[in-house]
Image (cartoon, grey):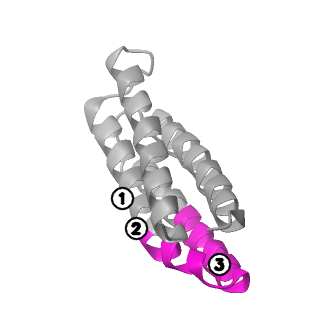
Amino acid sequence: MKRSRIYSKQFFTAMLAVLTLYFLLEMMNVIPLHVEGLLLVLASIFTLFAIGVLIIAGSLDRDAEQLAIKFLLLTTVQMLLVFGLVGFVVLTRMLDFRLVGFHLLGLFCTLLGIQSYLLITVKNKSV
């Protein structure tokens, strides 16, 4: 199986597990967040990382330099989009905007760590 397919399956599984756990914590009232904030956080993070998988997965079967360039570009764009979204949430004074921003950044950092780890392990695996 190609590295890009292995990475895509592993990352989507990990991402869905993290987002499902987050959603379940919200439903059990462990995380006090309103519904619109929850939907914004889950939808934006899922969309951002799903597009990221599509962009970077093709580079896994090429040389390491190409992968490094795409990874750095992807990470920069993802960070800018998340910070822009946090800024948008703050400017619109959404309910619990501080909490929404905190959870956006927390989920982003968690999934960015998972994304980096999986990219390194899948790239170093011999297929």
Mark 2, other Cα within 10 Å: few <14 / some 14–19 / many ≥20 = few
Mark 1, other Cα within 10 Å: few <14 / some 14–19 / many ≥20 = few
> Rounded to the nearest whole Å, what is the CA distance between mark 2 and mark 1?
6 Å
Disc 1, SS: helix
Q: Which numbered circle lies on residue 47?
A: 1
Residue bearing the label numbered 2: 51
Q: Is residue 79 above or below residue 11?
A: below
Q: Amino acid at mark 3?
A: Leu
Q: Amino acid at mark 1?
A: Thr
Q: Nearer the viewer, residue 61 or 26?
A: 61
Q: Amino acid at mark 2?
A: Ile
Disc 2, SS: helix
> Rounded to the nearest whole Å, what is the CA distance between mark 2 and mark 3?
16 Å
> Where does the image place residue 22, in percent across and percent down from the top left?
43, 30
Mark 2 or 3: the one toward you: 3
Residue drawn 38% across and 15% down?
29
Residue drawn 49% across and 44% down?
14
Q: Which numbered circle lies on residue 79?
A: none
Disc 3, SS: helix
Residues at discs 2 and 1 in contact (Cβ within 8 Å)? yes
Question: Along the horizontal axis of the image, is 94 left or right of 127?
Answer: left
* Residues in magenta, as a range: 54-80
Of pointers 3 and 1, the one earlier in the residue sequence? 1
Q: Residue 73: say if magenta.
A: yes
Residue bearing the label numbered 3: 67
Q: Is residue 56 above or below residue 115?
A: below
> In which quarter of the view is residue 96 placed?
top left
Q: Residue 66: say if magenta.
A: yes
Residue drawn 63% across and 61% down?
122
> Rounded to the nearest whole Å, what is the CA distance between mark 3 and mark 1?
21 Å
Residues at discs 2 and 3 in contact (Cβ within 8 Å)? no
| Residue 65 visible from this viewpoint | yes
